[in-house]
Image: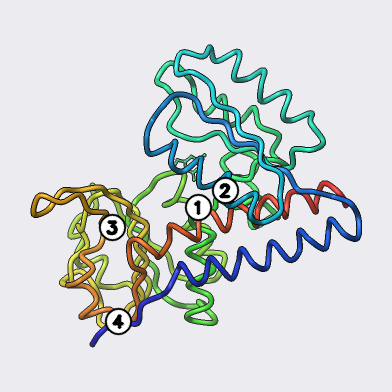
Amino acid sequence: MTAQVIDGKAFAADVRARVAAHVARLGEEQGIVPGLAVVLVGEDPASQVYVRNKGVQTREAGMASFEHKLPAETAEADLLALIAELNADPKVHGILVQLPLPAHMNADLVINAIDPAKDVDGFHISNVGLLGTGQKAMVPCTPLGCLMMLRAHHGSLSGLSAVVVGRSNIVGKPMAQLLLGDSCTVTIAHSRTRDLAAVCRGADILVAAVGRPEMITADMVKPGATVIDVGINRIERDGKARLVGDVDYAGVSAVAGAITPVPGGVGPMTIACLLANTLTACCRANG
Ligand code: GUN
């Protein structure tokens, strides 16, 4: 079997086009421009690339982009003061503080200082609680993008067995909540899981979000399963820098029914969902 490739790039382009069309309508009919503020503390190179891409795509969708770049040694109180300003600014509908933060900052404290209605990352404890209890929440962008692709591929997910490998607050846990919300039978596996291969082989839907290059191999995948690869790992092979996922793409493609590539799978969907969340926050703010 050769797995069908789930084209996240095309999917994301479609989501962005729909967001842009809605943004244009909002502007024409109500004179409203959704605004996204992105805060970057420090000079982490990967974070700088992500933040730049977010700004470009926000503007391309017709939204206002506000970028705040602070030095790594910024005091936590100064970051909290900036967040308070953004919370109060009616032009700002979404706020994203790029993670990781420098070690001297308490990320939980910072995230929970964001107005939950503007928390387009869905990381605020209120949104985590709302998602966990099946109420209207801001949903974290990466798992939301995965869910959209899974729904498009399968139609209904009801009754399917889903295994999420990875238990992070950003991806693993919210992904599991979303799959449960769509009536999957959900298992969260992690580094201490016994016989991980056997657990993974039980999955109709396998989501890999561990941050370990190519650790999901063909022997861990049920024939015909749908495999979603959240990993973005920079490695060197044959003297060349490469980007690979958490899934051994060549091997697993021969077994799975469908698979997301890296790059061009989950990655583009994450920013597209950030734009969608910003639009959602703006619409909710304006009744
Ligand atoms: N760093 C890596 N992924 C993310 C994300 O989804 N949101 C934020 N704020 N920071 C990140």
The residues tagged by marks 4 and 1 sit, at their Cα atoms, a distance apart of 26 Å
Q: Position of residue 188 (x, y in %)?
A: 37, 56
Local crowd at mark 4 within 10 Å, few (<14), some, or many (≥20)?
many
Residue corresponding to mark 4:
3
* N-term-proximal mark, 4 vs 1: 4
**Secondary structure at numbered mark 3:** loop
Q: Is residue 248 above or below residue 47?
A: below
Horizontally, is 46 left or right of 241 in the view?
right
Q: Do the residues labelled 2 and 1 touch (CB within 8 Å)?
A: no
- Distance between the Cα atoms at labels 4 and 3? 16 Å
Sequence-first tag of 2 and 4? 4
**Of residues 53 and 214, which is closer to you in this image?**
53
Q: Where is mark 2, residue-wise?
A: 56
Which x, y percent locates residue 156? 54, 80
Nearer the N terminus, badge 4 or badge 3?
Answer: 4
Is 90 left or right of 234, judged from the image as shown?
Answer: right
Spot occupied by residue 84 in the image (x, y as percentages of width and height): 71, 23
